[in-house]
Image: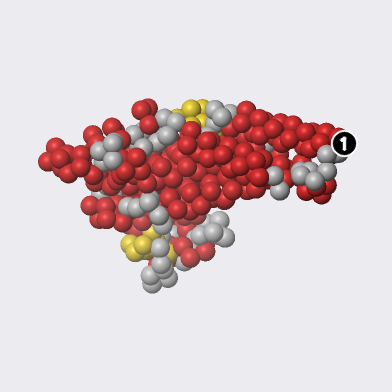
Amino acid sequence: NILTVLRFIELHLLDTNKQRMMFLSAPLWGKYEDADTQAGLSHILLRILKETLPESFERLVHYGKVVSLAKNFEAELVAMGLISDTDGIKHQNLCGKVLTPYVEDIEEHIAQKQRTSLLGKSREIMMGDYLSSMVVKDETDRCSLASLDELVSSEKKSVRKKEMDIGNDIGDFFFLRSMRVSVCAFRIMELIHETMLEATKCTSAARATVLYHTCRDIFELFRSIVPAIHKQNMDNSPRVAMLFHNDCLYLSHHALVLAHMYRHDMPLEIREGVVTVDQVPLLRELGDRMFEEQIRKHKEQIMEAFSNDCYYELEEVEDKGILEAFSSSIAESLKIINDVRGQWSDLLPENIFLYSMLVLCNDLRVGR
């Protein structure tokens, strides 16, 4: 028991002389400003507090006893004259409190620990399996038109109905078309929703802010990590490349309405600043680049099949060898298109799949 040892020193070695106890402040307790390099008692105890900090607020109730013990412990040290009653800084040759200011900001510290844990978890998901996929569609999606409509209070429903009628252009804009996305993207989006939902339950605006910004950082992590980590698979497999394209569409669809879904339940102080729609163009641009790159690659393959210059003489020369070569080129091009069709038909949204096939078949029609 640390207090027992300190009381023994105070009573039997220092004769309860606070002036003498003062000289032990820095050697025993340690300087707050050197917290990262010193091994004083305060730094050892602070490290223990950080290591035992719960990762969720559900467990905070069990941590309350630790908070109370930390405050009482430093109060005893103040009474002995070992530390001052100020936070952190030295006062009249005495080191200040370290544990009390830390536990008083416990919610923010837990939020920061949650942030680290969430970013680590999302990074682990992104660096894992990227070949498994699943079908998503509007009827069962978190951000379906029906689920969004339920968020609107009864007095605003008439306005909402006009704005988001599924039959008009705006309704189509918010409609998620059926497509395949990676399990990775789905898990990332679920993690973001869970984090935003937890932010709505925060009584502390500081903690809610940390969780909200963590969600934004996860979007940015996805844009940075996934194309880099899985680049080889995307370069070698048209299916994986278009899966990433779909993931970008899927995440951008959620980013479009995510803030709206949770903003009104956030702490009032941060409510107006909760925005995710700015992530939409960044994700869509990334997906569009992947789509255009895949179309370019396959167009080049088709053009390569017709690279023989003698094809331009077909109208004038009825050479059997040229005709056979031309027939072989057509067969090769059709094989390329059929291969792409087989990989993309059940993957892409129907409208995008039909457009991609139209572009490739048009190149086959016009040749070079």
| Residue drawn at 20 percent across, 42 percent down | 162
Figure check: 284 above or below 57: below
Furthest-left residue in view?
A: 155
Q: Give, as a three-letter code, the residue at label 1.
A: Gly
Q: Position of residue 178 (x, y in %)?
A: 44, 31
The N terminus lies in quadrant: top left
Whether residue 231 is visible, yes or no, is no
Q: Looking at this view, is 319 or 59 the one in front?
A: 319
Q: In the figure, residue 79 lies in which quadrant?
A: bottom left
Q: Position of residue 235 (x, y in %)?
A: 69, 43
Q: In the figure, residue 299 lies in which quadrant?
A: top right
Q: By what rule are the colours in the image chosen?
A: secondary structure
Q: Secondary structure at mark 1?
A: helix
| Residue drawn at 55 percent across, 56 percent down | 39
| Residue drawn at 43 percent across, 50 percent down | 280
* Residue highlighted by disc 1: 321
Q: Looking at this view, is 218 or 73 the one in front?
A: 218
- Residues packed near mark 1 inside 10 Å, few (<14), some (14 to 19) or many (20 plus): few
Q: Position of residue 274 (x, y in %)?
A: 32, 52
Q: Position of residue 233 (x, y in %)?
A: 68, 39
Q: In the figure, residue 359 lies in which quadrant?
A: top right
| Residue drawn at 40 percent across, 55 percent down | 278
Q: Looking at this view, is 20 or 12 the one in front?
A: 20
Whether residue 330 is visible, yes or no, is yes
